[in-house]
């Protein structure tokens, strides 16, 4: 049976026409058809399709704002002809299934056309005021959608549940637009000025959609906001990878961080794998690699909540799982599982896996869980860098090595509250000069050095690198030592400012040389121009004095 000859459809048309005539409506619309169907069920008219009763509550909700005459009469109504609205005609043209399917389509497209214009004019006025404040000559869907959300928050849609529900549903996406542009509610405050013209392509889309203008801009704005929300989550994802890589592997250059979508990835973080670091895959390498792999998804969870964990991190988790398995079962590098190579054992006659394979799987799970917690701690302590990189990615879409370094450098502590004036004490140090570039594992973290840089030894036999140029300005040779030759050097007294850390904090050094991990109680010393150092609490007063 075709839809247009179905008795329930024919009856719903009759009732819809009766409601239209009673309320002086000039044409049949999807809303009136919904009202007709609901009236049939509400007044217990004869309905042949039992499936329609399962849609009674949805029809009731859609009719919440419609006024259906109590004394509605359908006598002689079937003889009256009413034109169909463009939208209803389109729905009937596309509808080739059952009446239940037609009802579902009606419900999906239900829009309070009759009350569209007054509401739309309010949004238009707010958007026009915003346009004048920002110097825009045409209104776009994202501005109109933002205005609709601010109007919704002001209570303008309290008597219009259909629109209110649409805006509430799209709130998250529209908020992404507002946050990206840093718009505020006062930007949309009406100023009694004239209405600004709508962007032509926006008008075309409204005309083509056969839906109300207000519904159109909410829908289009939410769609645009959805793309922004996706790119924003990707920005935090890739920023998480980049920060973890920068903190754990300062000797590995970050070549690119991007949120430009491709067929393979929504975003990417690439490093230079040609250096010696990747040739020596030891225990330290695997520990760091697991954290870097997991950092993207964890950054998203820190920013957007634990429930934000989704399948987008699948490839990262897959890579981490494979690496952890190789660490434990293939290369025999795990201290707990021991020096065992399961693939080699599997080639031996009689090997059945069993206990060892189960233990390897258990250990892989333990390592991944531990890495997850370590990564959360790392990113939480360095969250300001994640926020900075994510913001830059949203602006520029792609960042290179220099961009990343500049974004993460701590340029000084002069603006930090509680700094003190200090002066370094003159002290003799044993110094050797690097014959090649490398990374020095200082007490506070790995720091990169170049050929010719000074490696200074402290009182506890610890070493830290100083660039050759800085060393020449701050140290003098002692006794018969010739400058540039390994030997004893005296540190010249210098004045600067310092502050004692009340909580753990990472200090990113200039030129991508590395990151120092400060603990509560450690002192950060600043000599100006981004020349920072970190001194443990038990050594600070041996090297410095506070200047009153």
Image (tube, grey):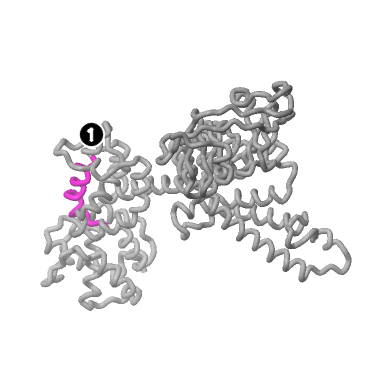
The magenta span reads 111-127
User: Taken as a whole, is the magenta stretch helix, strand or loop?
Assistant: helix
Q: Quadrant of residue 67?
A: bottom left
Other residues around mark 1 within 10 Å, as few (<14) / some (14–19) / many (≥20): some
Q: Can residue 155 be found in the magenta stretch?
A: no
Q: Quadrant of residue 57?
A: bottom left
Q: Horizontally, is 263 left or right of 284 in the view?
A: left
Q: Residue at x 21, y 71 (%)?
A: 39
36 vs 505: above or below: below
Q: Can residue 117 be found in the magenta stretch?
A: yes
Q: Horizontally, is 142 left or right of 541 in the view?
A: left
148 vs 533: above or below: below
Q: Position of residue 310 (x, y in %)?
A: 51, 57
Which residue is at the front of the view, 483 or 309? 483
Q: Position of residue 498 (x, y in %)?
A: 48, 37
Count the labels in the image: 1
Q: Which residue is mark 1?
A: 132
Determine if residue 398 is in view.
no
Which residue is at the front of the view, 229 or 377? 377
Q: Position of residue 94 (x, y in %)?
A: 36, 56
Quadrant for the N terminus, please. bottom left
Determine if residue 119 is in view.
yes
Q: Horizontally, is 280 left or right of 82 in the view?
A: right
Q: Secondary structure at mark 1?
A: helix
């Amino acid at each position: 049976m075709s839809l247009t000859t179905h008795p329930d459809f024919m009856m719903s048309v009759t009732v819809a026409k009766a409601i239209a005539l009673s309320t002086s409506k000039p044409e049949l619309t999807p809303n009136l058809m919904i009202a007709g169907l609901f009236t049939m069920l509400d007044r217990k008219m004869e309905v042949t399709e039992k499936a329609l009763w399962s849609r009674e509550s949805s029809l009731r909700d859609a009719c919440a704002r419609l006024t259906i005459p109590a004394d509605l009469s359908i006598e002689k109504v079937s003889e009256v002809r009413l034109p169909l609205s463009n939208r209803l005609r389109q729905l009937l043209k596309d509808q080739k299934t059952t009446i239940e399917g037609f009802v579902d389509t009606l419900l999906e497209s239900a829009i309070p056309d009759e009350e569209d214009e007054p509401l739309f004019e309010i949004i238009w006025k707010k958007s026009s005021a915003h346009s004048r404040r920002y110097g825009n000559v045409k209104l776009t869907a994202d501005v109109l959608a933002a205005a609709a959300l601010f109007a919704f928050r002001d209570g303008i849609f309290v008597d219009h549940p259909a629109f209110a529900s649409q805006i509430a549903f799209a709130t998250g996406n529209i908020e992404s637009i507002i946050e990206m542009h840093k718009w505020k509610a006062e930007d949309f405050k009406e100023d009694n000025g004239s209405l600004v013209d709508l962007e032509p392509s926006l008008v075309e889309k409204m005309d083509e959609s056969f839906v109300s203008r207000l519904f159109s801009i909410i829908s289009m704005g939410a769609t645009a906001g959805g793309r922004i929300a996706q790119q924003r989550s990707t920005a935090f994802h890739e920023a998480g990878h980049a920060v973890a890589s920068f903190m754990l592997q300062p000797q590995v250059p970050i070549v690119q961080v991007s949120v430009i979508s491709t067929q393979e990835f929504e975003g990417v973080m690439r490093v230079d794998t040609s250096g010696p670091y990747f040739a020596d895959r030891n225990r330290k390498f695997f520990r760091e690699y697991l954290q870097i792999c997991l950092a993207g998804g964890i950054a998203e969870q820190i920013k957007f909540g634990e429930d934000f964990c989704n399948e987008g991190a699948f490839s990262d988790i897959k890579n981490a799982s494979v690496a952890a398995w190789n660490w434990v079962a293939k290369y025999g590098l795990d201290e707990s599982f021991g020096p065992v190579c399961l693939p080699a054992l599997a080639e031996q006659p009689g090997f059945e896996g069993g206990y060892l394979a189960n233990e390897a799987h258990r250990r892989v799970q333990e390592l991944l869980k531990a890495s997850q917690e370590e990564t959360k701690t790392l990113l939480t302590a360095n969250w300001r860098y994640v926020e900075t990189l994510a913001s830059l990615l949203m602006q520029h879409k792609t960042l290179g090595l220099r961009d990343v370094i500049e974004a993460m450098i701590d340029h000084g502590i002069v603006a930090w509250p509680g700094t003190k004036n200090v002066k370094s004490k003159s002290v003799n140090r044993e110094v050797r000069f690097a014959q090649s570039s490398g990374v020095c594992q200082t007490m506070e973290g790995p720091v990169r050095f170049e050929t010719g840089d000074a490696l200074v030894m402290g009182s506890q036999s610890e070493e830290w690198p100083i660039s050759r140029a800085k060393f020449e300005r701050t140290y003098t040779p002692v006794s018969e030592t010739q400058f540039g030759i390994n030997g004893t050097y005296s540190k010249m007294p210098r004045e600067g400012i310092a502050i004692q850390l009340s909580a753990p904090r990472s200090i990113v050094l200039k030129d991508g040389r590395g990151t120092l991990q400060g603990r509560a109680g450690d002192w950060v010393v600043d000599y100006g121009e981004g020349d920072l150092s970190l001194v443990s609490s038990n050594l600070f007063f041996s090297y410095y004095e506070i200047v009153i």
